[in-house]
Amino acid sequence: MLPLVLGALAIALIRAWKMPVQLPGHQGVIWMAALVAARLVSRSRLGATVGGVGAFAVGMLPPAEASQALGILAAGIVLDAASSLRSLATPLLWSIGMGAIGNAVVLLAKLALGDLPRAIIREGVGFGLETYLAFGALGGLCVGLGALAVSYRECVLPRRRA
């Protein structure tokens, strides 16, 4: 249930809070953070996919952005498929990498559906891919640092007795 809420909340937050950044992929900070967090907190093997379903459901409400909603759903599927790679890296590096890859999948979905952001048309696909990777990695970094802080607190700091 929590992954579904995280995905839906990410889209609702993006719609409510328009960031004035004029770079392609900047919203990936929010939705990749939501999908990576959904994958980390879920006990199901489909945590990010369920988060993507929540994002897709809210994303298809008016004003619908089908390419963005489908891209986020595809990113959730890719994150769950790549979850077996978690054992190859630290949780922080995994979160950063998955955020970057997931946001690149969103760009590929937009390109496949012909929905090119204006900045990519102006600057080129290479520039767009770089910014999508960077913003996705930033979203993954936020979640990875949060997970690191929680695990540090649970493992190192003594618990207070009531």
Image: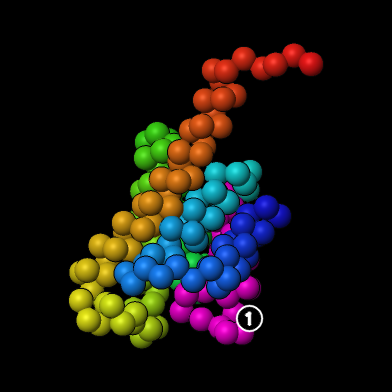
Q: Is residue 18 left or right of residue 121?
A: right
Foreground of the two, 93 or 142: 142
x, y percent for residue 74? 47, 67
Residue occupying the point 59% across, 24% down? 154
User: Quadrant where the N terminus lies?
Assistant: bottom right
- Residue 77 visible in the picture: no
Amino acid type of the residue tagged 1 in the rendering: Leu
Q: Quadrant of residue 64?
A: bottom right
Q: Main secondary structure of the magenta part?
A: helix
- Residue 41 visible in the picture: yes
x, y percent for residue 28? 43, 62
User: Quadrant where the C terminus lies?
Assistant: top right
x, y percent for residue 52? 56, 64
Q: Residue furthest front?
A: 20
Which range is magenta? 45-69
x, y percent for residue 62? 61, 84
Q: Residue furthest right?
A: 162
Q: Provide the residue designation for mark 1.
A: 61
Q: Is residue 62 magenta?
A: yes
Foreground of the two, 105 or 68: 68
How many numbered callouts? Answer: 1
Colouring rule applied to residues: rainbow
Q: Is residue 85 left or right of residue 1?
A: left
Q: Secondary structure at mark 1?
A: loop
Foreground of the two, 11 or 86: 11
Crowding around mark 1 (Cα neighbors within 10 Å: few <14, some 14 to 19, many 20+) is few
Q: Is residue 73 magenta?
A: no
Residue occupying the point 36% across, 85% down? 114
Residue occupying the point 49% across, 59% down? 30
Q: Is residue 140 left or right of residue 10?
A: left
